[in-house]
Image: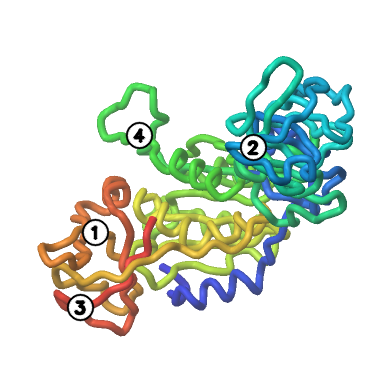
Amino acid sequence: MFRKLLSLEEARKILKESFSPKPISAERVSLSEAHDRVLAKDIVAPIDVPPFDRSTVDGYAVKAVDTFGADEDRPVALKFCGQVNVGEPPSVVVENGMTAEIATGAPLPKGADAVVMVEYSIRRGDTIFIHRPVSKGENVMEAGSDIHKGETILRRGQRLASREKGVLAALGLKEVDVYKRPKVAVISTGAEVVEPGKPLPPGKVYDINAHTLSAAVLECGGEPINLGIIPDERDQLEAAVKKALNLADAVITSGGVSVGPKDIIPQVLDTLGKPGVIISGISVKPGKPTTIAVINGKPVFSLPGHPTSSLLMFHMIVRPVICKMAGRREEVSPMVKAVAATKMFPARGRRTFVMVNLTYDKTGKLLASPVPAGLSGAITTLAKAMGFVEIEEKKQFVNEGEEVTVYLF
């Protein structure tokens, strides 16, 4: 039996006191490998972006003062002095009374300080007639106007998505320092589970947890190591967890933590190092058998074998730890207010998480409807839910029509 059922808050407090998650270390990776990684150092711009004054339109580079007074009826006549193309340094100089043809994105030639759009000009031989004046800097993107050299443009702890990678590319950076992904070993236990793709003998089920938990580890910045299915035999479990601790920074097991004769994970963990098991059972539904150990500085999360319970407890307990080990900032689950579509009943004396779907009634009111739980092993309970409602231990029920907070997946 469980030593003592802890509240969710007590379990989180004990875990925090026993293990302080932090980034493993840093490594340098190529820009192409940096997506969704976390910066380990601030990025200070080594160059101006853009690195030169550039035209933002197709037209003619001019001295703005030479266009003053131009209008449709009395255009200003300027002498054509050459052409500036994209990707080439200008070979012309714009003197007083002169203009150079310029393409969008091309560097502004020396002497010019503005660009007249091609729509407001007419060319006749080597004479360009300007029909609208421009002011200094008009249609020009100045050097450093996007990013100044020496500016801290990205901060340590930022995740690198498409926009951030674009900034790094604009700065010409080929490599970047990021936090290493924490390695998380994933072990499934039990004689009843079979690896997907293999024949399914009578009485067996396919291993769901290894794949859902590995995906969940990836989603919070970790690197999963699937160590396969281990039978509920003490020697084999002990050897598997020892191997996992040698290979990884954290370990997740599923199954073997309830009260059956084959549920021996807690006993195994307590023999492998100090302090051993720190949490053995949490007063929640689903997820009551959840067991947590710290073995010689590494956390081991032993989750229930039932897929819904396992994945939910990962998000409640494990996810924040892996995120911090990956260098990610604390993530807050999005939430919405809704009203209960039906009466909801919690488990007596336990924090209960009711999986719900969201719909609108005819008046536009957002309704939270419980997803049929089915059997405790049903993965579809979580897969079909849009979020969950958390019911506290002391609350007897949630009335139909009562306002609830829905935490979204």
What kind of residue is marked 4? Tyr
Q: CA distance from mark 4 to mark 3?
A: 39 Å
Residue 358 badge: 1
In this rendering, would 258 be left or right of 176?
left
The residue pinned by badge 4 equals: 206
Of badges 4 and 3, the one in the foreground is 3
N-terminal of the pair, mark 4 or mark 3, is 4
* Quarter of the image that includes the N terminus: bottom left
Image quadrant where residue 22 sits: bottom right
Q: CA distance from mark 2 to mark 3?
A: 74 Å
- Residue 159 is labelled as none
Local SS, label 2: loop
Task: Give SS at disc 4.
Answer: strand
Q: Which residue of the protein is positioned furthest toward the top in this rendering?
A: 125
* Left or right: residue 337 compared with residue 293: left
The amino acid type, in three-letter code, at marker 2 is Arg
Q: Say which label, 1 or 4, has the lower sequence index.
A: 4
**Residue appearing at x 73%, y 45% in the figure:** 68
Seen from the viewer's position, the closer of residues 155 and 98 is 98
Q: CA distance from mark 2 to mark 4?
A: 83 Å
Which three-letter amino acid code belongs to the residue tagged 3?
Glu
Mark 3 secondary-structure assignment: loop
